[in-house]
Image (tube, rainbow, N blue to C red):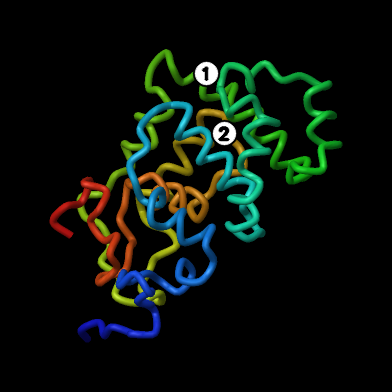
Amino acid sequence: MPATTSTSDLVVGEDGLARPLWASKDQLLMDYYDTEWGMPITDERGVFERLSLEIFQSGLSWRLILQRRPLLRQAFAGFDIDAVARFGDDDFERLMLDPVVIRNRLKITSIIKNARAAVALRENEPLQELVWGAKPLTTPRPTCAAEVPTTSDESRRLTKQLKARGFGFVGPTNLFALMEAIGIVDTHLVGSHRRGSSGVWPEN
């Protein structure tokens, strides 16, 4: 059956631009949607930061993570992989006591563990290359929110690859969200002013 467009899933703002509901009312989310979400990030630090933020977001709102992002960057040395990889017990305790950090023991432990795993990856396949290696042959073309996938064969495969290389707190859902955020797939709704804006999927 052909997909039908749900007009309620896109909102045309006062600026005449169509956005999904989640990015149509809150200015912080709107700015993020208009300027960042889905744009290519291909450098090691950038991919590591977005992966770490997706880990922090698990079970929480993305708005909360965006709001705290400047403070999280400060707490985690700008998400510099080498610096985070050197974090020891004192750093862990500092983070667990920091009120601006999402004080989840497993999440913090996993981010430090992931930094060390990312350093080890450099000898063969750097983190950014491994993650971008999950780029599929085609990208989804959702016309309404219900058609936006939350996982994919590629995100499931990437989960296995990262876990095998020592990464923690990674799964098909948060890795698919990472793939959306950094442009590996384009899940902007058809009709959104951001559809195809990344340049990765210009024909879609």
Closer to the N terminus: mark 1 or mark 2? 1
Residue occupying image coordinates x 39% and y 65%: 149
Rounded to the nearest angstrom, the CA distance separating label 1 from label 2 is: 11 Å
Q: Amino acid at mark 1?
A: Val
The answer to which image quadrant residue 190 occupies is bottom left
Residue occupying image coordinates x 78% and y 40%: 105
Question: In the image, is residue 22 above or below residue 154?
Answer: below
Horizontally, residue 172 falls left or right of residue 135, namely right
Characterize the local packing of mark 1: few (<14), some (14-19) or many (20 or more) Cα atoms within 10 angstroms: some
Residue occupying image coordinates x 16% and y 52%: 202
Residue ranking furthest to the left: 203
Q: Amino acid at mark 2?
A: Phe
In percent of width and height, residue 62 lies at 58, 57
In percent of width and height, residue 87 lies at 71, 20
SS of the residue under disc 2: loop
> Quick one: quadrant of the C terminus?
bottom left
SS of the residue under disc 1: helix
Horizontally, residue 140 falls left or right of residue 168, namely left
Q: Nearer the viewer, residue 192 or 102?
A: 192
Q: Nearer the viewer, residue 149 or 13?
A: 13
Horizontally, residue 203 falls left or right of residue 19, namely left
The answer to which image quadrant residue 71 occupies is top right
- Residue matched to label 2: 167
> Quick one: quadrant of the N terminus?
bottom left
Q: Nearer the viewer, residue 71 or 96?
A: 71
Q: Are marks 1 and 2 in contact (CB under 8 Å)?
A: no
Residue occupying image coordinates x 29% and y 75%: 143
Q: Which mark is residue 156?
A: none
